[in-house]
């Protein structure tokens, strides 16, 4: 009997092409669905399992949710993608599970942000709950700088963009660790280092990566973080703060090109094999 | 020993004032928290239970989530407010539970919207997943009208606003039913009727309300809808379609001034008594 | 002595490349300035004359204005680009000069728009004052459709986008005439015809073009429109309404690729020759 | 014969009420037009002269332009309101007339802004071309801060908001001079002083005002600035930089409540008398 899997995507990056190929190689009949070309309906289930890969977090959540409504198994689930994609929700899950992250507060107004900045201390990091590639993540030196950030964000029409996570700046700065976790197991770890003249380590901002040995503490923290978010295939970002590791954020639809290159791990094949293992279980 | 409850709010409407008063009358020491004035931290729990009342859906979700992270019981929970506040997610839960709603599709682009319009048929209703008081909910006569709506929404910077729920227009139109559900029991039902020259029945758009007898079918559907969303205190909106009832949407932070006036039910006192019943249970 | 001219641009389309080449062929030493790469200062004048070609109307106005401040001759001038780029201002100049255009009103709110729609009659065209390629230009059938357009535009943060030009829909529809005017002389005329399923004739929306003979009335109206806007090199769009010609709009930084192909006229060479003629005059 | 004047407004502030009263006191039959309630048409002229008072700069420009199209005399003219309301255009006019202002550059991208910051030197002021009450006017300490401002403004959909005027910060800071000019004559001058904890002196940001003697140099500079902008009734803001005065900006629809209180000058009556003097001249 046919092994059918749907691949939900909006923009086919290298990652999606590699996943498609790997799924086919392990024997799946893959149904690719371009959610920009077709409407989604609560009356259809192209396959019993869907791999969810839209770049837009919101679209990924919606596509997964619509499939789940008719009994489809999704990797990752809509709930995981939402909890990972919204940093306020991620931190709440971390806290509830007793996992460490930098001291943080949430402010909805200039007045509250000023109090949060004073409580967290400067320099501080200000970031909106939702966003990728470090966008709008700002290192603020003092309350005047923070005030300017709040004033600018007030003009954005989305309530999410007008929410501020104000966080202690971790001294290490300029670098963080990324661990890919698949089915409760870490695939490996890499260090991301910001380029000259930029403090954000995102590869999209010119950051470079290199493989690092999987430390036991990092590994344990990453696996737990994936678990509390409900993530089967996620990337966990962490900071090192004077030897202690702190969680930063989770990617629920992880990019992995840089990871593959740095660690020489065939991520899409491992994902495809995992999908086969859990299929119809 | 003191009964302590937190009241989370951003704008104190009549509803919040009445809830505050009722909670005090049943013996609670109420801690009101204005989330516009203070930052929220994952290190504090002003009370073991919080009644969540911010008008902004996003702020309500965040405030509830932050409290839940330190073990606070929330009414409603962050998850309920999110599932209710996002209509794509609500419909997914309804579908999974086998609850009826009008034929609907979700489109992310003009191309997909055109196909959705053709599949659902005209006139159709187009609405964004998130929004209150009927904002941007549009009755579109034909594909040219729908195309114009998509073109306008493309300019909005939020991905949510660029998502289209395209839904069969229910013939009854111009009116819907609202049922308030508290702790799994319906408090009553009212009919909302659109004002002359407007097809949306929202009170904020001039709609009028009147009490109606609680029909068994409506009552059952509303209670089930509240349950699948995880709502302890929610408003359920339904359409009547040739005698059959269909779910429209859920309000996770319900307004109830019009309901109180139409049905002569002391909603805040009933809520306060419910909160007391579940407190520390 | 060297003939120096600056070419101000942001995105180098085919048009800008052809202009650069033609200016060189007629003997100019061309200084191209990419206004996205360099800041502009009120203390510099790379050449005594500048050809102004940024795609963004606002950037074109600013770049021209900054050069004019130090005595540079600009083609077109900042004032022309602004008067052409803003349709409320264009219509004002047409009216003052007694030039014909379709009956139009300007509304800033839903209330005013409803009155304008009733006065102009349906179907009507609603368009924002600024915008290219027919964007947001909407053919509205009735007041409910118009109301929906206003409600959507209210969410846009720019006051310009929240301004509505409400205009009688010209029966001919689906086609208009474009005349290129250079130095007070018409270069030729073409007809633009909307593609199947679209009423806007913009080439960017799939419209096709064909050469037409330059009618004396059209020619005279186009030349006068260019004159009242202060345009040395502009495109004039007109409607034919039961044999009478009416002005639609002016392009102050005209695209001309389609025009060249349809009419076999070497537009950039004619422009370069014109620039040479007026240079240092 | 009746003296008729139109008062164009959107929000009736104290200023508009005082102007209405004063115009009546000097004998005018005043036709107030609320441009939010009525559409404007190019076919009507309620009076031969219009006093233009909408708060929204863009609406003021449009309302004035539409009246001018049918021969109405406007105070101020659409051109003046636009040149005053857009700081890039104002500075261009100042430069052309040889009037002094702080060293400034204009940047459209992060790349250009970085170069402008380096050329102007830090701390620098970054402001968008259009905006009132100091909104988004930011004092940036270094290139990282400037980069953050550019990154935030990139998200705003208006090209104007994505344009950066980067200006040398004037040491005096925290205070500036405001001169009201009417019909080529200065009415008086006041000093505006920023409140504690804020560097912007705008009254809307808590700044205080006090009357100062009209210095000859200030007076001359203000009158010339009004002239080059074409302003009949405008407010001119200036900085003092080590004894030398530099122009900051012009208000084409000036508020004058604070000015009246500080200087005990009946501004609306002076305006009304001026309007009477120029009426039908």
Image: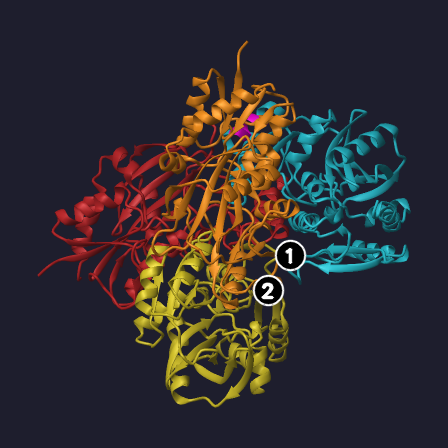
Chain colours: A orange, B cyan, C red, D yellow
Q: Specify whether A12 is left or right of A79.
A: left
Report x, y in % for residue D31.
61, 67
Q: Which residue is mark 2?
A: A119
Element assignment for label 2: helix
Report x, y in % for residue D91.
36, 69
Residue at 57% of width from left, 30% of height from top? A63
Q: Specify whether C60 is left or right of B213.
A: left
Alpha-carbon distance for marks 2 and 1?
A: 10 Å
* The one of B221 and B74 positioned closer to us in this rendering: B74
Q: Residue furthest front?
A: A216
Kindly check if marks 2 and 1 are in contact, taking CB atoms under 8 A apart as contact: yes
Q: Residue furthest top?
A: A1
* The one of D50 and A25 positioned closer to us in this rendering: A25
- In the rendered image, the vertical position of residue D263 relative to residue A122, given as above or below: below
Q: Quadrant location of residue B96?
A: top right
Residue B41 is tagged as 1
- In the rendered image, the vertical position of residue C195 relative to residue A244, given as above or below: above
Report x, y in % for residue D210.
54, 85
Q: Which residues are magenta?
A: B112-117
Q: Main secondary structure of the magenta part?
A: helix
**Residue A253 in magenta stretch:** no
């Amino acid at each position: 009997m046919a092994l059918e899997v749907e691949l939900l995507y909006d923009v086919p990056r290298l990652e999606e092409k590699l996943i498609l190929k790997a799924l086919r190689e392990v024997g799946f009949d893959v149904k690719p669905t371009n959610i920009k070309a077709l409407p989604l309906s609560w009356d259809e289930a192209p396959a019993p399992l869907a791999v969810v890969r839209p770049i837009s977090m919101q679209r990924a959540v919606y596509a997964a949710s619509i499939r789940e409504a008719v009994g489809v198994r999704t990797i990752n689930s809509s709930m995981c993608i939402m909890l990972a994609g919204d940093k306020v929700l991620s931190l709440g899950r971390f806290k509830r599970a007793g996992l460490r992250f930098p001291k943080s507060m949430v402010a909805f107004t200039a007045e509250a942000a000023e109090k949060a900045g004073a409580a967290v201390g400067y320099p501080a990091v200000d970031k909106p709950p939702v966003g990728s590639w470090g966008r709008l993540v700002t290192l603020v030196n003092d309350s005047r700088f923070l005030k300017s950030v709040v004033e600018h964000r007030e003009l954005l029409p989305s309530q999410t963009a007008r929410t501020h996570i104000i966080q202690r700046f971790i001294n290490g700065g300029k670098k963080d660790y990324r661990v890919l976790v698949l089915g409760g197991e870490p695939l490996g770890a890499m260090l991301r280092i910001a380029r000259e003249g930029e403090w954000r380590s995102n590869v999209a901002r010119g950051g470079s990566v290199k493989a690092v040995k999987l430390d036991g503490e990092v590994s344990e923290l990453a696996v737990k973080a994936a678990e509390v978010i409900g993530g089967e295939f996620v990337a966990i970002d962490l900071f090192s703060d004077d030897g202690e590791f702190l969680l930063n954020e989770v990617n629920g639809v992880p990019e992995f090109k840089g990871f593959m290159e740095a660690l020489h791990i065939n991520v899409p094949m491992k994902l495809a094999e995992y999908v086969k293992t859990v299929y119809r279980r």
